[in-house]
Each structure stands twice: as structure tokens, then as C-alpha cells.
């Protein structure tokens, strides 16, 4: 069945969903790490934004939270659902920096990076609040893994022009973040 679907897909004319994403910026952390990753001067030409993150923290005590701020301000609410193979849970916080997920620290094997897809909905709108959703996952094959689903709310009507990500003690070398615009 898969070969048939591939043949059918190759005969489709016009554009596929993949063309709805346009690369805006990509950054890879160099030697010594960095305290934050920022995307600035974000154009207001898309419907939504997406960040794809491959990350590791310089912190030595295990996993670290990744926080996101928009236009330099904190978020106002976040919710989290998570599971680690043996248990599940949920929590939330109001009037806090928006947490997007957890990434592995330097005590994990050196080749272990967390992955994430973060969507920022209606980022340029000035008549409604900004919301985000993030899917994070990491598994280092020694201390176990975790998968997390986050949602965040910014009660701000300003169009988004800057997004900053921070993590514990910082992002380790080879952490990579790519910002995409989603056409509407």
C-alpha cells in the first residue's frame, strides 16, 4: 500500500502542506553555550509561527525548563501534561514565565538532546491574546525519558516581533533552534 500512496502523492499537482512553512531564521549554539536564544525583527507576514528545537542544557543537575518570552515580557499562564513511562501528571501556573518543556542537562550522555515543536498562534494579531502549544520529548536511555505537552497564554495585544528562549544555566553547544512562519 505504501508504494501506491507514494506514486499517488507524486502525481499531485499544486502545492502540498509542506509549502505552508517558510524558514525565517536558524541558530546553532557555538562553543561555550549561551544563556538564551532570540529571534528578533520577526516579520508580520504569516498567520502563525513555529519553532523547532533540538536542545541540551549546560546545567549539571539533570533536566532544565525551557522558558519563552515574547517582546521581552513574561507570560501569564501555562499548563502542562506529562508522562515518563511509569507515571503521568499535570500542573499549571498563573502569572509566571511560560515554561515550554524540559531539556536534558550535562549529566545525560553527551549525545542526548531534547526535541520540541513550539507553535505560537496568531502572533501578529493586535485584537487577541497570544497562545502557544509545545510538544517536548527526551530520553537518555539511562535515567528514563519524558514527553510533555504545554500550553501558554500571553495577555498582551502587541504584535510579536521578538521571541526569546532561556534554559536553566543556558543552552549547551550544538543546541539548534529554527523559526518558521506558517502561511494562513
Image (cartoon, rainbow, N blue to C red):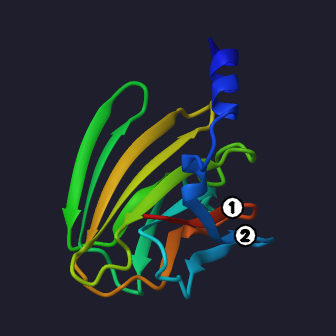
Q: How many numbered circles are shown?
A: 2
Q: CA distance from mark 2 to mark 1?
A: 5 Å
- Residue 164: give its label: none
Q: Note whether 108 is above or below 36 in the view shown.
A: above
Residue 87 in the image: above or below residue 14: above
The x and y percentages for residue 116 are: 53, 51
Instruction: State the SS at label 2.
Output: loop
Label 2 neighbour load within 10 Å: few <14, some 14-19, many 20+ = some
Decide if residue 48 is in sight here. Answer: yes
Q: Residue at x 37, y 63 (%)?
A: 99
Q: Which mark is residue 29?
A: 2
The answer to which quarter of the image holds residue 70 is bottom left
Nearest the viewer among 26 and 114 is 26
**123 versus 100 height, above or below:** below
Give the percent coordinates (x, y) of residue 4. Answer: 66, 16
Left or right: 89 in relation to 161: left
Give the residue pinned by disc 1.
175
Report if the CB atoms under discs 2 and 1 are less than 8 Å apart.
Answer: yes
Foreground: 67 or 109? Answer: 67
Which residue is the extreme one toward the left? 94
The C terminus sits in image quarter = bottom left
Q: Is residue 63 visible?
A: no
Percent coordinates x, y for residue 169 in the rendering = 56, 70
Q: Residue at x 59, y 75 (%)?
A: 37
Q: Which residue shows up at 61% across the image and 65% down it?
A: 22
In this view, which residue lies farthest toward the right? 31
Q: Earlier in the sequence, mark 2 or mark 1?
A: 2
Q: Position of residue 124 (x, y in %)?
A: 37, 79
Crowd rating for badge 1 (residues with CA inside 10 Å; few <14, some 14–19, many 20+): many
Disc 1, SS: loop
Question: What residue sits 33% from the left and 29% below the top?
Answer: 87
Q: Is residue 173 above or below residue 124?
A: above
Amino acid at each position: 500500500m505504501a508504494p501506491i500512496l507514494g506514486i499517488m502523492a507524486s502525481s499531485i499537482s499544486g502545492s502540498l502542506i509542506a509549502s505552508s512553512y517558510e524558514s525565517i531564521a536558524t541558530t546553532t549554539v557555538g562553543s561555550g553555550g549561551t544563556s538564551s536564544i532570540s529571534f528578533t525583527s520577526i516579520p508580520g507576514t504569516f498567520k502563525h509561527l513555529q519553532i523547532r528545537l533540538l536542545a541540551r542544557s549546560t546545567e549539571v543537575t539533570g533536566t532544565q525548563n525551557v522558558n519563552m518570552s515574547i517582546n521581552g515580557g513574561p507570560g501569564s499562564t501555562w499548563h502542562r501534561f506529562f508522562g515518563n513511562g511509569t507515571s503521568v501528571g499535570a500542573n499549571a501556573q498563573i502569572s509566571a514565565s511560560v515554561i515550554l518543556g524540559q531539556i536534558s542537562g550535562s549529566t545525560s550522555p553527551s549525545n542526548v538532546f531534547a526535541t520540541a515543536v513550539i507553535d505560537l498562534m496568531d502572533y501578529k494579531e493586535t485584537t487577541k491574546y497570544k497562545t502557544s502549544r509545545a510538544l517536548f520529548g527526551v530520553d537518555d536511555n539511562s535515567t528514563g525519558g519524558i514527553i510533555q505537552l504545554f500550553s501558554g497564554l500571553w495577555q498582551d495585544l502587541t504584535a510579536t516581533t521578538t521571541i526569546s528562549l532561556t534554559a536553566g544555566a543556558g543552552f549547551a553547544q550544538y543546541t539548534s533552534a529554527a523559526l518558521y512562519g506558517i502561511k494562513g
